[in-house]
Amino acid sequence: MLEVKKIKRLFKSGDLQVAAVNGVSFSVPDGQFASIVGRSGSGKSTLLSLLGALDKPTSGSIKVDGEDITQLNDHSLIRYRCQKIGFVFQSYNLVPNLTAAENVMLPMEFAGVGAKERQERAVTLLQQVGLTENEIGRKPGRLSGGQQQRVAIARALANKPKLILADEPTGNLDSQTGKMIFDLLHGLAKSEKTTIIVVTHDLEIAGKTDRAFQLKDGKLQEKK
Amino acid sequence: MNVVSRGIRNAFRNVIRTFSIVIILGLSIGLSLTMLIAHQAVGDKIQSIKASVGNTVSISPAGARGFEGGGNPLTAANLNSVKSLPHVLSNVATLSDRLTSSNSSLQSAIDAGALGKRFSQNSGFVFHAQTGEAIGVGGPGGGGSFSFTPPVTVTGTNAPTNLSAGPLGGGGTFTLKSGSVFSANSTADVALVSTSIASKNNLKVGSSFTAYNTAVQVVGIFDAGNTFSNNQVILPLATEQNLSSQTGDLTSITLNVDSISNVSTVTSAASKALGSSADVTNAASDAQTTITPLQNIQSISLYSLIGAVIAGAIIILLTMIMIVRERRREIGVIKAIGGSNVKVMGQFMVEAVTFTFMAAVIGIGLGVLAGNPITRLLVNNSSSSASVATPFGGGGGRVLRAGGHGFGALRNNFSNIHAIIGWNIILYGLAAALIIAIVGSGLASLFIAKIRPAEVMRVE
């Protein structure tokens, strides 16, 4: 269960303070697939950073399974990101000199999973997202955009997180591949009972999620 | 795949850049090692020169060296005033004279030759054609024909067991061939004669010769190792003083000092005690003149070593900063998916260590190849400068000096410098590489620590 209460994130811009996220509150139960839409500069990525503990809010609380992540110290935040969060980025952000399998094994290494177990799980996850045995051993430079995003999704699932945060996961993909990726995420939300929050500006995608929010000038409104 | 293997693999992400960095860093480490090798070789040589000079202070009558110059002899009172100075362990007192046909039955073991005649003419004395006895005052071009037989040197000493260090002039090394050595306080009319004198005069242990109209018995025969030193006879100091009617007189005193670092102090103290009656010198001052250029090389090599290590550290530092800036987003991603600062820093440090160890292999190779030639080049250049800068030699071939080491002998050490390249040098090279890697990647690690994972979202 994700519970967000009155979070604010203020940035200084010269003498002024700008609220990128301004008193946002919402909650998403486990296994739900939610989307947040908004124009560029509306605060979508800032909100995602706060949910993923990449940044700290100026005020408010974010509870994941009852634990307020805004109160965690740096060491605990690293553990939180490692064990409870999975990230999927618009431009995939895979490590270029590691193979697809090694990229998926990376978060498991940080979580202290043994070498054999992470190798087996990485292969399983990559096969689950549709990569062939040959593609599993390739470096990102030798995979298509859709394949790279599949690897990124497998990496996000590596440590069986409670929450997957996806920032424009289909933004760099053609519509057909984008639909495949969306379907993959949707299916995972159901099969793995993982909460997935997708930030997008694609209203068509937003229309297909369980819940849809719109972020405008730092304020959140539920649309669906 | 772990931090170490990822760090090593990352070092080869850009092969051309890696190759360039490794070559430049290798040159830097090679220069460091070459300078270290030169520094050690020159340091060893300086120690060797200091050790070969010995811890001695030489005292001569003011204005006289051996049989040249003039002035009055040293006295027993002079010896008493310096032999108990602080840091003086022992002393060797000698009285040297010459035996000619007028006061001895001995025949010289050396023929005069052209040099002997010239030296004789320039000394201001003319010697009798057959006897070799001085018969008048002459001078260069003084006219008249004459012949000259070099006299036999006779030395009285109070240190018959330490003949190589003091009384044995001309740089000879005493080796007793037969018989025995007389005691230090002996007053008997006994002598040690050289193998050359013994051969020329048909002397054996137990036979006698005449000196100062007194029969002197041969108790031992020695070999001094060179022709000049082998033209001499050694008597007990008291005997020589008595027979030559120079009771209490001395022509040289050698003080043995406890440490080379105290030689200068003892020299000053002896000068003060003896005043203007004696010239006090030490071989250490000659050695210092000789080793000053070596010390300059040592300083240059040390500064170059430090400079090369700093240059290496700066190269790897700038490289790692460049790499960290280039991989800013990747670092953000690793942190976002659960990587800690320590793990990310460790990965980059391993990458830096990989660069420097590859460079160390090249650097050690260069150091081993260039160590000796560069050391010799530095020393030879410095040796030339030293030769021009210090024209004064050791005081002439007939000067009797403690230890027998003149400046020329010390200067010859320049050409004998040989750098020894052992495992310690290789270990120093690897240690230098490790230090360069840690120092170089240290600042880069601070940049890594400052990168916040949220930055990866902002560039999306």
Image (cartoon, coloured by chain):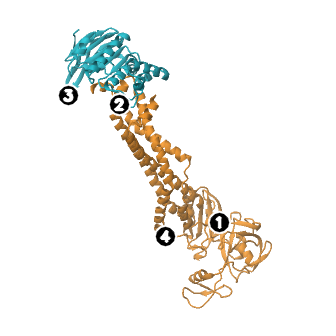
Chain colours: A cyan, B orange
Categorize mark 1 by other alpha carbons within 10 Å: few (<14), some (14-19), many (20+): many
- For marks 3 and 4, give the one nearer the viewer: 3
Evaluate whether label 2 is on the same chain as label 1. no
Residue at disc 4, secondary structure: loop
Q: Residue A14: which numbered mark, if any? A: 3
Q: Disc 4 is attached to a residue of which chain?
A: B
Evaluate whether label 1 is on the same chain as label 3. no
**Measured Cα–Cα span from mark 2 to mark 1:** 84 Å
**Measured Cα–Cα span from mark 1 to mark 3:** 88 Å
Categorize mark 3 by other alpha carbons within 10 Å: few (<14), some (14-19), many (20+): few
Q: Residue A141: which numbered mark, if any? A: 2
**Residue placed under numbered mark 4 in the picture:** B391
- For marks 2 and 1, give the one nearer the viewer: 2
Residue at disc 1, secondary structure: loop
**Measured Cα–Cα span from mark 3 to mark 2:** 41 Å
Q: Is residue B277 left or right of residue B157?
A: left
- For marks 3 and 2, give the one nearer the viewer: 2
Q: Is residue A183 left or right of residue B395?
A: left
Q: Position of residue A163 (x, y in %)?
A: 35, 14
Residue A3 lies in quadrant: top left
| B132 and B444: which is toward the camera | B444
Evaluate whether label 3 is on the same chain as label 2. yes
- Amino acid under disc 3: Gly
